[in-house]
Image (tube, rainbow, N blue to C red):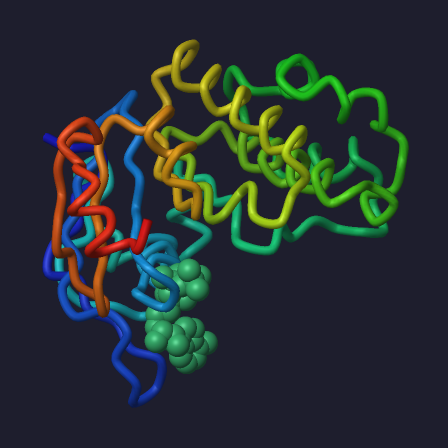
Amino acid sequence: MSLLAVSALTASYGVSQALFGVDLELDEGEVLAVMGRNGMGKTTTVKAICRMIRSQGRLQFDGHDLHALPSFRVARLGIGLVPEGRRCFGNLTVAENLIATARPGPWDMRRVAYLFPRLDERRNQRAASLSGGEQQMLAIGRALMTNPRLLILDEATEGLAPIIRQEIRAAIARLKSETAMAILVIDKSLTDLRRVADRAVILERGKTVWSGRMSALTRQISQRFVGV
Ligand code: ATP
């Protein structure tokens, strides 16, 4: 049984339908890339999984029907979201931001500091004073502090300097090799995704149009559906 099983997922913003049948599965310890051009439904899929918008279809995590749960219960079940646009509490320090989401488990301040030494150096600084890249690390750290079984990264390296992208990529690679965490990753860089993801699904107009192992994603397929 897959850790996350999504099928025939549909969702709308008011009268405007955004998802028309998303199918994806994710196992423990696996990294899945959710790909597609702008506006194809990647973020909406993530919002549906986290119960931030209403949806229909099959949405199961570890055997639980997520449709029966409010979003805070989904987080407690073990889904940690790093949302697009990295939301942290600007007035709180780095340490306070991390403590705010802490739940029991192997991930604590020490382990996050080990993964992102920059955060440790800035632990008493207000989050608002961090650079964009550091705020992104903090957003990932906050999600890890919830001790998720599934970590969702929505455009985690968007708009960041190459050196910071590299640091975040390396951290994701370490999560993959050192933990059994499942990771769902959305990123514009196909090169980055090829390095880290085991499998991919491609969305077009709110529907899964391709899924398979990353190694089976040919240039023709990516050019047709993702444009690169
Ligand atoms: P991007 O790569 O640009 O983030 P995406 O693949 O994540 O794109 P979504 O943000 O999920 O795409 O958008 C899917 C569709 O839903 C698009 O047509 C978009 O315009 C629409 N949409 C997204 N958010 C809203 C909203 N808050 N209200 C109305 N429509 C929305």
Viewer-proximal residue among 191 and 25: 191
Residue 218 x/y as whole percent: 17, 37
Viewer-proximal residue among 168 and 19: 168
Viewer-proximal residue among 47 and 171: 171
Residue 115 visible, this orientation: yes
Q: Quadrant of ligand 1?
A: bottom left
- Badge count: 0
Q: Where 99 sits versus 155, above or below?
A: above
Q: Where 116 sits versus 7, above or below?
A: above
Residue 149 x/y as whole percent: 37, 29
Residue 31 x/y as whole percent: 31, 29
Q: What residue is rendered at 89% in x and 35% in y?
A: 125
Residue 53 visible, this orientation: no
Q: Where 162 sits versus 160, above or below?
A: above
Q: What residue is rendered at 73% in x and 45% in y?
A: 132
Residue 162 falls in which quadrant of the image?
top right
Q: What residue is rendered at 31% in x and 70% in y?
A: 54
Judge left or right: residue 221 versus residue 106. left
Q: What residue is rendered at 17% in x and 63% in y?
A: 207
Judge left or right: residue 13 versus residue 219. right
Residue 200 falls in which quadrant of the image?
top left
Most extreme residue toward the bottom is: 15
Residue 15 x/y as whole percent: 29, 89
Q: Where 48 sits versus 91, above or below?
A: below
Q: Quadrant of the N terminus?
A: top left
